[in-house]
Image (spheres, rainbow, N blue to C red):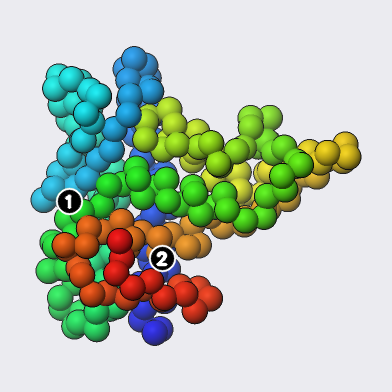
Amino acid sequence: MYRQWQAQAALSQDTKALANAIGAAFQAIIADRPDLADAHFDFTSDDGKLKVEASGLGDTDRQWLEQRLNSDTGLVGAVGMFNADLGHLLGVNAETAVDDTAATAAKIDGSVHFLAMMQGVVNKAGQTGWLSDATYTDGQGQGIDLAQARTDSLSGMIDAKRQLDALQDGSVVTRLANGHVLYGAQVNPDPWFEAGIIAPAFVSSHSVSSAKVAGGHGLLIDRLI
């Protein structure tokens, strides 16, 4: 169990680092190609390369976006670290030897849709602690509404990350229906805390079919999909 918690903690940090890398990469891409800001897509890893999946993009734009993502060494490295630690976590859960980590990571390669996984983090962060009669903004006055946040585009992922960052750094401004304003409230102090639990759910069931993931409060998720 201790090894499992360690692996989950590492994967949580990997997910946060991956979100930072994605955000930086997407900002740079939008600067060059603002016409792709709202294009819907996702990406996976494929033997050390990133593969873009986008039914709404033409081949030329999809290939350009794929090449641009692969040229970002920080993003590629963050994906590689995530895959390695996810493989380690699933290896621990399956009670395999640590030596099997590389083999497990190879099996999951291509299974995780990374923007869909980030949507899972957003959805989880938006589930609890929010008042229905309040409105929320970050420190710059931009709205926070994780129920509406979508990560499946360049602009959408950047905005979702802005909201998650505000949760983590405590810069959320809460305006109550009675007119009171609360500054610095942390509705969910660490949206990445459960990322080590959420991430394995985005591994295709054909990759690892019998692993079990223990959650923070005794939650047990069997069959990851």
Which residue is located at x 27 percent, y 47 percent? 113
| Residue 90, percent from left and from top | 26, 71
| Residue 225, percent from left and from top | 30, 61
**Disc 2 residue crowd, few under 14, some 14–19, many 20+, Cα 10 Å:** many
- Amino acid type at image mark 2: Ile
- Amino acid type at image mark 1: Gly
Residue 110 circle label: 1
Secondary structure of the residue carrying tag 1 is: loop
Find disc 2 in the rendering and name its residue: 197
Q: Marks 1 and 2, how far apart in space? A: 19 Å
**Numbered circles on residues, count:** 2
Which residue is located at x 17 percent, y 55 percent? 109
* Mark 1 vs 2, N-terminal side: 1
Q: Is residue 46 above or below residue 179?
A: below
Question: Is 13 displayed left or right of 52 in the figure?
Answer: right
Is residue 188 at all visible to an observer of this figure? Answer: yes
| Residue 217, percent from left and from top | 53, 76
